[in-house]
Image (tube, rainbow, N blue to C red):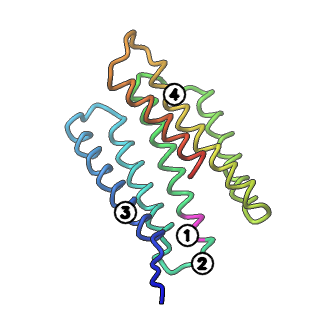
Amino acid sequence: MAFHISTAAINHLGFAATFLCISLGFLFVKLVLREETGPGLWAISFLLNSIGFIFWSARIRIAPWQYFLIGEIAHMSGFILLVIGIYRFTGHKIKMKNTFSLCLFLIIWILMIVYFNHNRMVSVIGLRILRTSLFFYAGFCVLFQPSKQKSVGEKLVVTSLIIWGLYNLLYG
């Protein structure tokens, strides 16, 4: 007799706990660096991602399409706040073209979610590409920030964001 336990829910709950801890860490940084916008947005970002993983764990008894949708909304909202926080933290000012780009991004994202019922493969690939583009954009914001010389930390952030984007493309 084989014994099998599905680890998908456990993995999602583990990610939720990890992202919650990261969120609390950024909350601490925000309390220390009160004038900085980035850490507060990052704290909210990781909290939203934690909530998304809780819904994706399917432990809450709702229809599968509902936990997919709520998890997707929480994740994408978190990712967008992460990018806005990075954008502001690196000294960039939000301009009209940023607002227009975000609106276009959200329209495409909504279309991918709506298209999910018609063709899941195309929808999932589209959502992965959108997430990847967010992480790449955030990495390039750090890479092309106004400072002249890049520190080791900045190089690490750029590398991490690009790797996270590739992970989302391949496995997200």
Helix, strand or loop under label 4? loop
Q: Position of residue 116 (x, y in %)?
A: 72, 61
Q: Position of residue 145 (x, y in %)?
A: 45, 18
Q: Identify which amino acid the numbered label 4 is placed on.
A: Ile
Mark 3 to mark 2: distance in Å?
22 Å
Residue indicated by mark 2:
63
Q: Of discs 1 and 4, which sits in the foreground?
A: 1
Give the residue displayed 51% in from the left and 28% down from the top.
94
Helix, strand or loop under label 2? loop
Q: Which residue sits furthest left?
A: 32
Q: Quadrant of residue 66?
A: bottom right
Q: Of discs 4 and 2, which sits in the foreground?
A: 2
Mark 2 to mark 1: distance in Å?
7 Å
Q: Position of residue 77 (x, y in %)?
A: 51, 50
Pointers 2 and 1 in contact (C-beta within 8 Å): yes
Q: Tell me the tag on residue 14.
A: 3
Residue indicated by mark 4:
94
Mark positioned earlier in the residue sequence (4 or 3) = 3
Mark 4 to mark 2: distance in Å?
38 Å
Mark 4 to mark 3: distance in Å?
35 Å
Give the residue displayed 67% in from the left and 55% down from the top.
124
Residue indicated by mark 1:
67
Q: Of discs 4 and 3, which sits in the foreground?
A: 3
Mark positioned earlier in the residue sequence (4 or 2) = 2
